[in-house]
């Protein structure tokens, strides 16, 4: 009996190790593909508590621009400008390099192998009628606000299709659907620069 239990334990450990190696390879492929794009554009839909926002974001190095309904976020590499057309206000914040959320810092949303998470390959799962790779990630550092993260990858392209976050600060799941990822040719530098003249009459709140 002891010999059988030991054998089962070894097999289970071996399976977990293979799963971790599989997730490592898949997530490395994601990182390599994103890096190879240079400047790129992502269309997305994010849903929290049944409410959805669609938009797109543009990335150029550490700079980015998010455009969604009623909201625009511009990061020039040194500060982040959140612009609400509904409230007619601009909130200026310092950049949080540890943020991995799509509205917080989309340049880092696909950084899965930088030590922020541990990861395990779960297997294939059907998402909206398509078979996807499923990988579970767990927070590895206490300063990371994302406690858990589920990543679904397209089996053909290897790129992310859906990400499900469990965030400490909102105590609920947040789902991000990646609708498309495209390389940008000759991106416009104005996308990543905040121009105060465009927002005359807006209240500016500066937290830097």
Image (tube, rainbow, N blue to C red):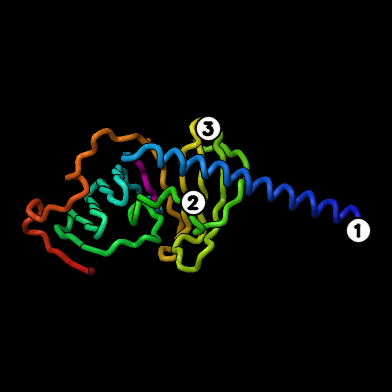
Q: Quadrant of residue 105?
A: bottom left
Residue found at x 23% / y 69%: 207
Mark 3 → mark 1, Cα distance in angstroms: 42 Å
Mark 1 or mark 2, earlier in chain: 1
The residue that mark 1 highlights is 2
Label 2: which residue? 112
Residue 130, numbered label = 3
Q: CA distance from mark 1 to mark 2?
A: 39 Å
Residue 55 included in the magenta stretch of the image: no
Secondary structure at badge 3 equals strand
Residue at 41% over, 50% down: 109
Secondary element under disc 2, as helix, strand or loop, is loop
| Residue 43 lies in the magenta stretch | yes
Query: What percent of the width, then of the height, locates residue 197?
Result: 7, 53
Q: Which stretch appears magenta?
A: 42-47
Q: Quadrant of the N terminus?
A: bottom right
């Amino acid at each position: 009996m002891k010999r059988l239990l030991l054998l089962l334990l070894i097999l289970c450990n071996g399976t977990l190790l293979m799963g971790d190696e599989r997730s490592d390879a898949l997530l490395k492929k994601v990182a390599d593909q994103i890096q190879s794009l240079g400047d790129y554009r992502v269309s997305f839909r994010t849903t929290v508590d049944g409410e959805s926002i669609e938009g797109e974001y543009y990335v150029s190095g550490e700079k980015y621009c998010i455009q969604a309904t009623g909201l625009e976020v511009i990061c020039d590499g040194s500060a982040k400008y959140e612009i609400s057309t509904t409230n007619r206000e601009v909130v200026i914040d310092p950049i949080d390099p540890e943020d991995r959320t799509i509205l917080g810092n989309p340049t880092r949303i696909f950084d899965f192998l930088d030590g922020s998470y541990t990861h395990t390959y779960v297997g294939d799962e059907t998402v909206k009628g398509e078979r996807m790779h499923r990988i579970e990630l767990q927070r590895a550092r206490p300063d990371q606000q994302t406690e858990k993260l589920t990543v679904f990858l397209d089996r053909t392209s290897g790129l992310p299709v859906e990400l499900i976050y469990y965030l400490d600060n909102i105590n609920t799941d947040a789902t991000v659907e990646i609708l498309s990822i495209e390389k940008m040719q000759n991106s416009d530098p104005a996308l990543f620069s905040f121009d105060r003249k465009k927002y005359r009459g807006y209240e500016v709140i500066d937290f830097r």
